[in-house]
Image: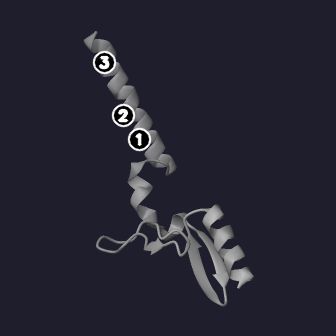
Amino acid sequence: MIRLIVIGALLYLAWRIFRTALGKGPANISQGRQPAGQIDDVMVQDPKCQVYFPRREGFAAKVDGQTHYFCSEKCRDEFLADHKAK
């Protein structure tokens, strides 16, 4: 039984080393992030429903030269419809 656990652990470690060598493992996760101490993303408020969310997850729309970010396509479409009605 212990032999199976040891073999399993060795196979897992070999798999992790192989993934890291290919650039898909945890060793490369931090390359796409901001340096320590800096904000990774900005929280913004949806102008339609007033919900806060990370800007990178939002849906953008440019209105009168200003970019607005929305939590969903539904909020974006409602905001644009309200803006056109004015």
Q: The N terminus appears in which quarter of the rendering?
A: top left
| Disc 1 residue crowd, few under 14, some 14–19, many 20+, Cα 10 Å | some
Which label was assigned to residue 50? none
Residue at image x 34%, y 75%?
38
Mark 1 is on which residue type? Ile
Q: Position of residue 13 (x, y in %)?
A: 36, 34
Q: Is residue 48 above or below residue 16?
A: below
Mark 2 is on which residue type? Leu
Q: Are marks 1 and 2 in contact (CB under 8 Å)?
A: yes
Label 3 belongs to which residue? 5
Mark 3 is on which residue type? Ile
Which label was assigned to residue 13? 2
Q: Is residue 73 left or right of residue 52?
A: right
Q: Which of disc 3 and disc 2 is earlier in sequence?
A: 3
Kind of element beneath mark 1? helix
Q: Is residue 13 left or right of residue 86?
A: left
* CA–CA distance in space, label 2 to label 3: 12 Å
Of tags 3 and 1, the one toward the viewer is 3
Q: Is residue 30 above or below residue 42?
A: above
User: In the image shown, does 86 or 76 lie closer to the viewer?
Assistant: 86
The quarter of the displayed image where residue 35 is located: bottom left
Residue at image x 68%, y 68%?
77
Label 1 belongs to which residue? 17
Q: Position of residue 76 (x, y in %)?
A: 64, 69
| Disc 3 residue crowd, few under 14, some 14–19, many 20+, Cα 10 Å | few
Kind of element beneath mark 2? helix
Q: Which of disc 1 and disc 3 is earlier in sequence?
A: 3
Q: Is residue 78 left or right of residue 25?
A: right
Kind of element beneath mark 3? helix
* CA–CA distance in space, label 3 to label 1: 18 Å
Q: Are marks 3 and 1 in contact (CB under 8 Å)?
A: no
* CA–CA distance in space, label 1 to label 2: 6 Å
